[in-house]
Image: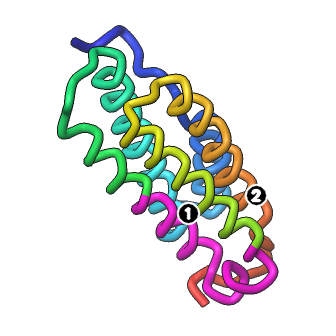
């Protein structure tokens, strides 16, 4: 069942990645982060529905894959040097909050799931915003 709208689990990430993709004139890394964020948000909505219904759904596994893809797209966007150097605290925060979502999904804990998404959304959005705008293609 689909509502007239899809809930937003990644509102900050969707907003900043859309802005960055527009600002970067569709440059591949920024657009890839936006596409990954959209896919992760959709998978989160499906997983949330399954959690609320008490179902053991394939959507739980799909969500985990989409989160890994979003984290990877974010790291590519940031660039290896920044992600493992100056941005390492952002990388660790993204990983920590992603692990919390994975734990909530495994535990089928809807409240923790929702709370964990707030942290993950903020972590990814902050990482995207903090990437220096002077980093060439962000793939270095």
The quarter of the picture where the C terminus appears is bottom right
**Residue that numbered label 2 is attached to:** 129
Q: Which mark is residue 81?
A: none
The quarter of the picture where the N terminus appears is top left
Please tell me which residue is depicted at 41% across the width and 15% down the height of the picture: 5
Q: Which residues are magenta?
A: 68-88
Q: Along the line of sight, which residue is nearer the eye, 139 or 22?
A: 139
Disc 1, SS: helix
Mark 1 Cα within 10 Å, few/some/many (few <14, many 20+)?
Answer: many
| Colour pattern of the rendering | rainbow
Q: Is residue 140 left or right of residue 44?
A: right
**Residue that numbered label 1 is attached to:** 30
Q: Is residue 51 left or right of residue 28?
A: left
Please tell me which residue is depicted at 77% across the width and 70% down the height of the picture: 89
Tell me: residue 36, above or below residue 3: below
Q: Is residue 30 left or right of residue 126?
A: left
Residue that sits furthest to the top in the current view: 4
The reply to whether discs 2 and 1 touch (Cβ–Cβ < 8 Å) is no
Disc 2, SS: helix
Name the magenta segment's main secondary structure: helix
- Tell me the quarter of the picture where residue 60 sits: top left
> Between marks 2 and 1, how big is the CA–CA gap?
11 Å
Tell me: residue 90, above or below residue 109: below
The percent coordinates of residue 79 (x first, y second) are 62, 81
């Amino acid at each position: 069942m689909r509502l007239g709208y899809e809930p937003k689990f990644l509102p900050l990430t969707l907003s900043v990645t859309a802005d960055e993709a527009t600002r970067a004139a569709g440059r591949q890394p920024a657009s890839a982060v936006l596409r990954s964020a959209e896919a992760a948000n959709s998978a989160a909505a499906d997983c949330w529905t399954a959690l609320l219904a008490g179902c053991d759904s394939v959507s739980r596994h799909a969500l985990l894959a989409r989160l890994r893809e979003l984290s990877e797209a974010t790291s590519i966007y940031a660039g290896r040097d920044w992600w493992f150097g100056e941005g390492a605290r952002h990388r660790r925060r993204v990983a920590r909050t992603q692990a919390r979502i994975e734990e909530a999904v495994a535990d089928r804990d809807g409240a923790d799931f929702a709370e964990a998404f707030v942290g993950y959304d903020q972590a990814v959005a902050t990482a995207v915003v903090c990437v220096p705008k002077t980093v060439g293609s962000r793939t270095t």
